[in-house]
């Protein structure tokens, strides 16, 4: 059976929403919002989304609906079912887009939320709601083929890459991890059986990336509004009715595919990863981990045990190659890859400095598996207390 709908709150502001920031698309969207072109029938739209990136497009769609009820008559939200999180899996967390929609009581209860999972549930939902168009943005699963085929105008998707580059689940991660000079956003039709193989109807210009400062959060904040603007353009100009008449030339960009990120994606190897690779992972994931193989000496049993533990670097990871080499030239020449140095010049602000293949990184907060996070000085004392004699993070 189809999940019972959860009423969500939509936005009815005291003054018109300011959808557009200062971008190259601002002038167009302003015209779109104030156009008086007559439409024969208002669209019934199913919006499928989950995260913060999709929330921006959802906000834009609701604002467009309010400005043009003759074009968009109804918008339903389809999102993923809440999932258990945290230790013991006892915390139930809703998707970011559902949290946003429920956050403000001032939003009228004009949007209904559904959480279908199976193809049959999607089919039942279409029988009940009779959608004309589905819009999927960072939804996390392929829209069922039968559901898509039942829609008058098929579907649209906002994808944060310059397609066909970085098709797949993690284009923002890929752009940052590969330290690309630029990226962008595409709006495409939904392909019935494959991710990101639709007809591209809109692309932003190439958006420059600061390869040494850009984080996943900053890039998402930069691209999400541009994707929302592109979606409004495609809707307002009705490109979805005859997609082949509005195809964007994408031959400049090579085809590539990105897989979902996993816990393994956060792993670094000090023996093979460069300083910039480690820092790129840190900017994407907010923390990285490495495996610490060490020897524990048991004095009572007069024995030694080889142990492998995960060590997470959590706070203020930075490149200190130049400064550390200048301060400790002799030490730099003798340190092995994976060896660390405890900088306690300022005991209240100590750092663990690790040697990589091409330089040094400093970590302020370290969390060893099964232990609480601590600073570098506390970690060193803890290792000595436990009789750990091998001091290589590798």
Image (tube, rainbow, N blue to C red):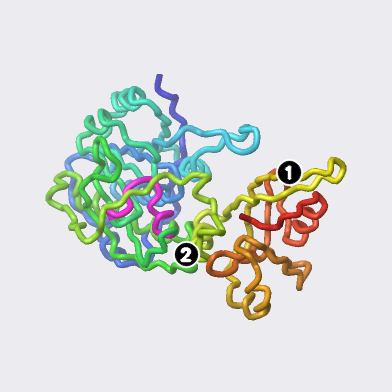
- SS state under label 1: strand
Residue at the far front in the pictured view: 302
In this view of the protein, which residue sits in the foreground, 316 or 141? 316
State yes or no: residue 175 in magenta: yes
Query: Would you place residue 178 above or below residue 121 in this image?
Result: below
Q: Residue at x 44, y 25 (%)?
A: 4
The correct choice, above or below, for 348 with respect to 245 in the image is: below
Q: Earlier in the sequence, mark 1 or mark 2?
A: 2
Disc 1 target residue = 305
Left or right: 249 with respect to 370? left
Q: Position of residue 307 (x, y in %)?
A: 69, 45
Q: CA distance from mark 1 to mark 2?
A: 42 Å
Residue placed furthest toward the left: 245
Count of labels in the image: 2
Q: Which image quarter: residue 23?
A: bottom left
What residue is shown at x 58% (from left), y 77% (from top)?
Answer: 322
Q: Which residue is mark 2?
A: 214
The magenta span reads 163-176
Q: Residue furthest bottom?
A: 326
Residue 359 in the image, given as x and y percentages of width and height = 56, 69
Q: What is the secondary structure assignment of the residue under circle 2?
A: loop
């Amino acid at each position: 059976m189809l999940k019972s709908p959860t009423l969500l709150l939509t936005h009815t502001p005291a003054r018109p929403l300011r959808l557009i920031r200062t971008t190259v698309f601002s002038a167009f969207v302003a015209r779109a919002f104030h156009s008086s072109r007559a439409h024969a029938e208002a669209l019934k739209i199913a919006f499928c989304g989950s995260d913060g990136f999709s929330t921006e497009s959802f906000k834009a769609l609701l604002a467009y609906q309010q400005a043009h009820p003759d074009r968009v008559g109804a918008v339903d939200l389809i999102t993923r079912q809440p999932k258990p999180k945290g230790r013991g899996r006892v915390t139930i967390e809703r998707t970011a887009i559902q949290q946003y929609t429920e956050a403000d009581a001032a939003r009228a209860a004009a949007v209904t939320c559904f959480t279908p999972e199976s193809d049959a549930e999607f089919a039942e939902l279409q029988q009940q709601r009779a959608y004309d168009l589905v819009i999927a943005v960072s939804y996390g699963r392929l829209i069922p083929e039968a559901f898509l085929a039942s829609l008058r105008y098929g579907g649209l998707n906002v994808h944060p890459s310059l397609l066909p580059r970085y098709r797949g689940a993690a284009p923002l991660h890929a752009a940052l991890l590969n330290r690309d000079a630029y990226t962008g956003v595409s709006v495409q039709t939904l392909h019935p059986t494959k991710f990101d193989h639709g007809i591209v109807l809109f692309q932003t210009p190439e958006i420059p990336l600061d390869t040494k400062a850009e984080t996943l959060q900053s890039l998402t904040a930069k691209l999400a509004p541009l994707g929302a603007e592109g979606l409004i353009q495609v809707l307002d100009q009705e490109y979805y009715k005859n997609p082949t008449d509005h195809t964007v030339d994408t031959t400049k960009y090579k085809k590539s595919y990105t897989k979902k990120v996993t816990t393994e994606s956060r792993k670094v190897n000090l023996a093979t990863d460069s300083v910039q690779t480690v820092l790129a992972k840190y900017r994407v994931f907010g923390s990285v981990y490495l495996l610490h193989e060490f020897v524990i000496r048991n004095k009572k049993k007069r024995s030694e045990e080889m142990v492998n533990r995960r060590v997470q670097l959590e706070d203020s990871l930075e490149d200190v190659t130049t400064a550390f080499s200048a301060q400790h030239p002799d030490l730099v020449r003798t340190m092995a890859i994976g060896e660390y140095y405890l900088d306690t010049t300022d005991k209240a602000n100590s750092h663990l400095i690790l040697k990589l293949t091409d330089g040094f990184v400093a970590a302020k907060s370290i969390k060893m598996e099964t232990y609480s996070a601590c600073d570098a000085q506390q970690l060193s004392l803890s290792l000595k207390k436990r009789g750990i004699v091998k001091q290589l993070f590798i």
